[in-house]
């Protein structure tokens, strides 16, 4: 496998993007490297928050319509829709997330027999600095319906651990990532696909973040290889969150669990101290029945002060099913105590 | 990579084909060879790239020469701040005067003419419709105005997407069907050419998605396609403020992915051709449609006033028709750039043009018009430079006057034509004079007075012929004052033949017409006459002009609006005599269709 990839890229280095492929593979399409990338990248549309955009990119990773993307604000806000390359639009559910790899797996809400072209993430390759790459994404949401996503070219500059973030948010991935000389750090590009010049999948385009030392916007992609265990675990329905399993780590309810259990969606935690405002209440849920409302700011759970969304998710994770919980909220400048039972 | 099975198949093919290639002795180009070829290409195309500056020389953008006599294309947002005369630098280090010719504010295109040489280097256009994502491209221009000697800066990239649509910046400057590239585009690149890797001109770089980094390259820039520019160039040469087109119907993408007609104006040509809400629009402008976005993208590349083919489908089957595009904006004057397009814009706004560097305020004293070229500019409402319109209008109309030379009395005489229809042999006679035009067929008589032309005076079967002939009678006098307005439109493709024609537009009271000329003959090959809103055009074609006392066509063709077929009438006799046209007519029978 490895030999094959290196062999191919060696040939490709001497040639331009599509001609490289043309010269060696006379396939049905004239530009297979580009069109295959375009066939598996989906356009994501959700809710924007502040200066963060309401659109993004994702990569189809299963025949059934599982989509790999960055675990960013788009995923957290819910109400996601995906537009697949042929222009069809699907509602999207979050299947699982992984903090350590900064990754989320989504699933298109499809009919059972629906199938999609997808990236074979299990047989991904590694590339070396200096090798040519292509990056596919819906940056700047240039494409909306069935138009192909954008493709830009570049080379891998290096593969290093990244000390980066945005504001107080720190990039959680510790393993080395690809640094690119192409500008991929654009609105909506996160979650896009990085391939070799010949179209082999090698990474997922990262977020809009700055390097901690230089304050420069970083163009990076997380190697697909690093993501394999997380993707496999999420697709199998297993929990793969090595942070949570570590000793001394506090367990925290995921946003998805919070929504599924309590029926609460919070503002996405963009900074470490994002206030615990309730963004949405699911009708008929525990929270709805108890009388929590959209716009409530949660100040306390029991006697514990809640300073952030993370605080709240941590506090709520401590209750067993059926236990009584008192939540104090600020509603229209008045404090209200609301009682509910843990779901 | 599409599926695990797909991977192995592709891999196998790679190995097999590589083996075959080696066996056949086909050696891929080496990096060095490829580089050498690129260097040669750049050396070949760079001389056509120009730096466009206001007269004071402060600030500026880019452009590209397209003909030896100095015509060059740039962005409207580059030239609009430069006045009617500007300075252009070539990579030979020389500075030339240039005058504005035509502008297309919606498409962000300007045509200028460099002066002082007849042997300017120029680029050759490629087919931008053949460009695909992944193609290598070269962008040339003068980013950050780095080149004091006007040697263009070259940036390299690939095509990121084609047929892109970028929403208007402000009320116009709409980029439709553009080419998205990842080559670096920065302020000063605007108006500069995009080439494919073989050096064929495929676009004009005019816009980029600027965002958090400020107004510098973001890896997403947009070039106006050469296909669109070529559809406009011959209109821009008319010195007009050229408008884009719109249709009198709207479409949406239906749930099943088809492009569905949503609303149709009931007085529109499309309605008369049978287009109704719920019909499927299959193609427009010869491009197959897969979404409403496709339609918006392709519609944007056409100038107002041209006839565009379209295919629609309803329960009765597939229908092919043409519709004439209406003006989108109807500019009376060169529009102001939107606020954010003016110098001192806010950084961080996405989707703005990488404009010219803002001109410095103290270059006004240098903006004097070069004396030897002052006559090359004429101001007039709805024109960017009326000088060029007069030039072409007179070029087309003066030969008509010459064709009447020596028979001055003929223009006040009555001209009569009798014909036989080539299909059913029916006979007819047309008489036209200075007061009006009359028509006699085997069934009826019609009369159209010149002072009070009305659609109801036209014959049903020969719709518009009387109004057209009244214009014909005066057109040969080549006196624009005989009409409300006579102006040169430019060159375009004529339906249904697709012939390249030059068009002269005539406003004659309420009647509008478009006369068509070709390079082969000074005499027109046809006219389309609009009698008023809600009526189909009379579309007449002329063939085989004879030089009698007055030139007359051997055959007169009538284009059927539904079938786009031409019915030809053979002219049996032509006569010129003094006296008025007999005004008797059976006008009750002459209802408009």
Image: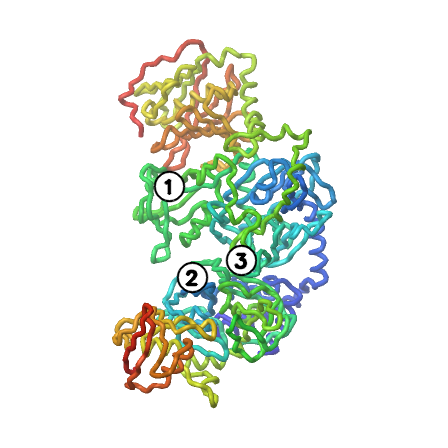
Marks 1 and 2: CB-CB under 8 Å?
Answer: no
Secondary structure, mark 1, is loop
CA distance separating discs 3 and 2: 32 Å
For residue B248, the mark is 1
Of residues A186 and B271, the one drawn nearer to the viewer in this rendering:
A186
* Residue beneath disc 2: A86
Residue B122 locus on image (x, y percent): 66, 43
For discs 1 and 3, the disc positioned in front in the rendered view: 3
Badge 2 density bin: few <14, some 14–19, many ≥20, Cα 10 Å: some
For discs 1 and 2, the disc positioned in front in the rendered view: 1
Do marks 3 and 2 both belong to one polypeptide chain?
A: no
Residue in the picture at 68% in, 62% down: B29
For residue B348, the mark is 3
Secondary structure, mark 2, is loop
Chain bearing tag 3 is B
Badge 1 density bin: few <14, some 14–19, many ≥20, Cα 10 Å: some
Badge 3 density bin: few <14, some 14–19, many ≥20, Cα 10 Å: some
- Point out the image quarter for the C terminus of chain B: top left
Chain bearing tag 1 is B
CA distance separating discs 1 and 2: 29 Å
């Amino acid at each position: 496998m490895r030999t094959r990839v290196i062999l191919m890229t060696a040939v490709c280095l001497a040639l331009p993007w599509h001609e490289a492929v043309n010269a060696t593979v006379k396939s049905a399409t004239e530009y297979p490297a580009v069109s295959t990338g375009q066939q598996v990248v989906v356009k994501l549309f959700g809710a924007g928050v502040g200066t963060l955009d309401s659109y993004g990119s994702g990569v189809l990773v299963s025949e059934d319509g599982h989509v790999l993307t960055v675990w960013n604000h788009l995923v957290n806000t819910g109400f996601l829709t995906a537009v697949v390359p042929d222009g069809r639009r699907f509602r999207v559910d979050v299947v699982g997330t992984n903090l350590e790899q900064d990754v989320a797996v989504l699933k298109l809400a499809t009919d059972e027999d629906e199938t999609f072209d997808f990236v074979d993430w299990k047989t991904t390759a590694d590339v070396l600095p200096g090798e040519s790459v292509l990056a596919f994404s819906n940056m700047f949401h240039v494409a909306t319906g069935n138009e192909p996503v954008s493709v830009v070219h570049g080379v891998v500059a290096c593969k290093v651990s990244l000390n980066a973030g945005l504001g107080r948010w720190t990039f959680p991935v510790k393993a080395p990532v690809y640094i690119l000389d192409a500008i991929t750090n654009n609105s909506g590009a996160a979650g896009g696909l990085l391939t070799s010049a010949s179209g082999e999948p090698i990474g997922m385009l990262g977020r809009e973040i700055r390097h901690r030392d230089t304050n420069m916007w970083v163009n990076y992609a997380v190697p697909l290889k690093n993501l394999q265990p997380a993707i496999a675990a999420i697709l199998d329905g297993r929990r793969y969150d090595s942070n949570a399993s570590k000793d001394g780590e506090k367990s925290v309810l995921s946003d998805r669990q919070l929504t599924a259990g309590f029926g609460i969606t919070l503002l996405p935690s963009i900074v470490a101290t994002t206030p615990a405002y309730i963004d949405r209440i699911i009708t008929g849920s525990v929270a709805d029945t108890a009388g929590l409302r959209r716009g409530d700011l949660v100040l306390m759970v029991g006697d514990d002060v809640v300073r952030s969304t993370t605080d709240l998710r941590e506090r709520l994770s401590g209750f067993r099913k059926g236990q009584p919980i008192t939540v104090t909220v600020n509603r229209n400048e008045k404090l209200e105590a609301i009682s509910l039972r843990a779901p | 990579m599409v599926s695990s099975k797909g991977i192995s198949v592709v891999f196998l093919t790679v190995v097999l084909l590589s083996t075959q290639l080696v066996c056949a002795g086909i050696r891929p180009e080496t990096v060095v060879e490829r580089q050498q070829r690129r260097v040669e290409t750049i050396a070949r195309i760079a001389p056509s790239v120009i730096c466009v500056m206001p007269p004071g020389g402060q600030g500026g953008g880019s452009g590209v020469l397209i003909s030896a006599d100095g015509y060059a294309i740039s962005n409207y947002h580059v030239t609009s701040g430069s006045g009617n005369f500007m300075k252009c630098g070539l990579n030979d280090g020389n500075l030339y005067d240039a005058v504005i010719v035509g502008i297309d504010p919606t498409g962000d295109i300007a045509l200028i003419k460099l002066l002082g040489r007849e042997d300017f280097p120029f680029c050759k256009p490629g087919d931008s419709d053949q460009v695909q994502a992944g193609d290598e491209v070269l962008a040339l221009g003068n980013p950050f105005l780095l080149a004091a000697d006007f040697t263009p800066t070259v940036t390299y990239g690939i095509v990121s997407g084609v047929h892109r649509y970028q929403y208007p910046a402000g009320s116009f400057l709409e980029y439709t069907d553009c080419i998205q590239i990842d080559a670096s585009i920065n302020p000063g690149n605007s108006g500069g050419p995009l080439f494919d890797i073989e050096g064929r001109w495929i676009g004009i770089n005019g816009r980029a998605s600027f965002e958090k980094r400020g107004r510098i390259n973001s890896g997403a820039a947009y070039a106006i396609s050469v296909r669109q520019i070529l559809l406009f160039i011959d209109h821009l040469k008319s010195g007009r403020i050229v408008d884009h087109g719109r249709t009198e119907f709207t479409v949406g993408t239906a749930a099943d992915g088809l492009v569905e007609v949503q609303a149709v104006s009931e007085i529109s040509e499309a309605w008369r051709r049978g287009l109704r809400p719920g019909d499927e629009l299959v193609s427009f402008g010869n491009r197959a449609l897969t979404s409403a976005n496709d339609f918006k993208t392709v519609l944007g590349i056409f100038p107002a006033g041209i006839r565009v083919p379209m295919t629609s489908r309803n329960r009765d089957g597939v229908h092919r028709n043409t519709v004439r595009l209406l003006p989108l904006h109807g500019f009376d004057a060169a529009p102001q750039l939107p606020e954010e397009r003016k110098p001192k814009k806010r950084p961080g706004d996405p989707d703005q043009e990488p404009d010219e560097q803002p001109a410095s305020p103290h270059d006004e004293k240098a903006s004097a018009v070069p004396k030897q070229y002052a006559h090359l500019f004429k101001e007039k409402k709805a024109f960017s430079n009326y000088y060029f319109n007069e030039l072409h209008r007179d070029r087309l109309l003066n030969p008509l006057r010459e064709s009447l030379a020596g028979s001055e009395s003929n223009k006040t005489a009555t001209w009569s034509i009798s014909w036989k229809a080539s299909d059913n042999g029916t006979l007819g006679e047309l008489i036209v004079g200075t007061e009006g035009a009359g028509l006699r067929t085997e069934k009826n008589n019609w009369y159209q007075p010149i002072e009070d032309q009305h659609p109801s005076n036209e014959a049903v079967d020969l719709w518009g012929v009387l109004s057209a002939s009244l214009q014909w009678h005066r057109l040969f006098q080549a006196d624009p004052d005989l009409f409300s307005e006579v102006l040169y439109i430019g060159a375009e493709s004529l339906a249904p033949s697709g012939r390249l024609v030059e068009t002269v537009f005539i406003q004659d009271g309420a009647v509008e017409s478009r006369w068509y000329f070709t390079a082969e003959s000074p005499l027109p090959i046809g006219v389309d006459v609009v009698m008023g809103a809600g009526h189909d055009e009379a579309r007449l074609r002329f063939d085989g002009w004879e030089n009698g006392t007055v030139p007359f066509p051997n055959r007169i063709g009538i284009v059927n609006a539904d079938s786009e077929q031409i019915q030809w009438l053979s002219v049996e006799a032509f006569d010129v005599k003094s006296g008025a046209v007999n005004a008797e007519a059976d006008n009750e029978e002459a209802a408009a269709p």
